């Protein structure tokens, strides 16, 4: 089984195409999904999926949720299963926005690409991913990347990584620790308020893992 998460209006043959129902889209005119679901509530068996694929979806999750979901998807994947993630290239897009040679329109399109189209309550980007950052999190989460590619479409810049599940044994508890450690890198300092922030993030990640971890 192969999963295409957040399929929108793009149907991929050979995949189970999954997205919100049409009434949760404000501009999408048709649904091609095989299954309507909230991606943060999906459940599949351990080691049962061949591939998880998502294009311009990962950036719509808060950092704590994104980390938790990545590790959860790994739990679903079979040995050497594949994950394929495409996101806006934050670094390249930011350079375009900051360039004095970019037109006002190009700068505006770049800002939309960074922060989201914002036509629905989910159409917001919570994190700016670069190839380096995405590779780093994939490696922490038990993947080895096999292919990285970059593309541009109508003035937007994107990065796509194809990665393979490695042989590490990552339990649910280990997954929570990985999230906890990664989220710590976003702290400003070790003050009580920042420690409380970290605890909040870690709790969200743990709750997400508990919902979707493979059975």
Image (spheres, rainbow, N blue to C red):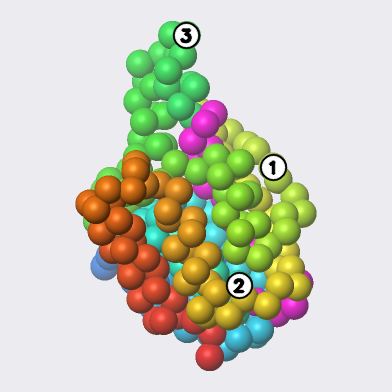
The quarter of the displayed image where residue 159 is located: top right
How many marks can you see?
A: 3
Of callouts 2 and 1, the N-terminal one: 2
Viewer-side label of 2, 1? 2
Q: Residue at x 65, y 57 (%)?
A: 139
Q: Is residue 186 above or below residue 34?
A: above
What are the residue bounds of the magenta stretch? 77-92
Q: CA distance from mark 2 to mark 1?
A: 21 Å
Residue 153 location in percent, x, y?
Answer: 55, 35
- Disc 1 packing (10 Å; few <14; some 14–19; many ≥20): few
Q: Is residue 8 left or right of residue 188?
A: right
Of callouts 3 and 1, the N-terminal one: 3
Q: Which residue is mark 2?
A: 74
- Disc 3 packing (10 Å; few <14; some 14–19; many ≥20): few
Which type of secondary structure does the marked residue at label 2 adopt? helix
Number of the label disc, if any, that sits on residue 149: 1
Q: Are marks 3 and 2 in contact (CB under 8 Å)?
A: no
Q: Residue at x 52, y 80 (%)?
A: 172
Q: Nearer the viewer, residue 22 or 161?
A: 161
């Amino acid at each position: 089984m192969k999963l295409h998460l957040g399929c929108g209006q793009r149907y991929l043959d050979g995949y189970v195409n999954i997205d919100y129902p049409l009434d949760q889209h404000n501009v999408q005119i048709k649904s091609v999904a095989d299954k309507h679901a909230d991606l943060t509530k999906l459940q599949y068996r351990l080691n049962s999926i061949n591939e998880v694929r998502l294009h311009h979806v990962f950036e719509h999750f808060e950092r704590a949720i994104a980390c938790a979901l990545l590790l959860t998807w790994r739990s679903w994947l079979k040995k050497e299963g594949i994950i394929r993630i495409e996101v806006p290239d934050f670094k390249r897009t930011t350079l375009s926005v900051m360039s004095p040679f970019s037109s006002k329109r190009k700068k505006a399109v770049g800002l939309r690409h960074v922060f989201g189209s914002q036509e629905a309550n989910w159409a917001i980007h919570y994190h700016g991913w670069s190839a380096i950052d995405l590779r780093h999190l994939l490696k922490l989460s038990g993947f080895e990347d096999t292919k990285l590619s970059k593309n541009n479409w109508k003035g937007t810049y994107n990065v796509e990584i194809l990665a393979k599940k490695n042989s590490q044994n990552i339990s649910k508890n280990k997954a929570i620790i990985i999230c906890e450690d990664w989220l710590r890198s976003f702290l400003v300092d070790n003050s009580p308020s920042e420690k409380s922030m970290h605890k909040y993030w870690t709790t969200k990640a743990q709750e997400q893992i508990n919902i979707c971890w493979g059975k």
